[in-house]
Image (tube, rainbow, N blue to C red):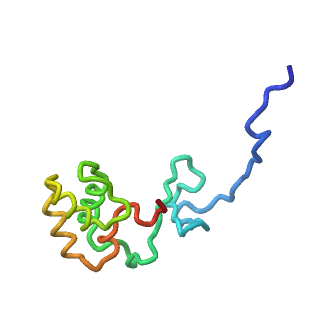
Amino acid sequence: MGRKRLITDSFQVVKRQRRAPDTKEESPEDGLILEPGTAGSRHAEAVPVPADAPPGGSPCPAQLEMLKQFDLSWEYGPCTGITRLQRWERAKSLGLSPPITVWETLLEHEGDPSFLHCLWHGYPL
């Protein structure tokens, strides 16, 4: 028997430069932003930033969180390929009793793309 193979035999080890912990690092692919201190970390989460996002963050984080929970709730059917309002109306027509607050929020922010599209809108099907 030969020597035991290591993962580094097949994949080259790449060392990255260290950055200051208080700066955000922008990933070259798809405009992803890594949170400070997570570059090189195993638990770093890259979050896509929509091109039409308002500067300075979202205007109503509590409402966006409620819509995110609506997107994650499978009891109202799949949400990819349609807008949140279309999904809400489809669930209502099927008698699934979607939350009225979601409908009111969607009508209140009708032209805003961050409210209009579901959580996975920017990802290919």
Percent across and percent down for residue 122 are: 45, 66
Quadrant of res 121: bottom left
Rendered residue at 54%/69% (across/down): 31
> Compared to 7, does 116 lie above or below?
below
Residue found at x 47% / y 62%:
123
Given residues 125 and 71, the one toward you in this image is 125
Q: Is residue 113 above or below residue 37?
A: below
Vertical position of residue 1 compared to residue 94: above or below: above
Q: Position of residue 17 (x, y in %)?
A: 68, 59
User: With respect to residue 108, does 64 lie above or below?
Assistant: above
What count of labels does the image hold?
Answer: 0
Query: Looking at this rendering, what residue extends furthest in the front direction?
Result: 94
Q: Residue at the right extreme?
A: 2
Please tell me which residue is depicted at 34% across the width and 71% down the height of the picture.
Answer: 114
Quadrant of the rendering where the N terminus is positioned = top right
66 left or right of 119?
left
Q: For this rendering, which residue is in front, 63 or 40?
A: 63
Kindly identify the residue that appears in the image at 75 percent across and 47 percent down.
Answer: 13
Residue 85, percent across and down?
A: 24, 68
For residue 20, side relative to residue 79 (left or right): right
Q: Position of residue 115 (x, y in %)?
A: 29, 70
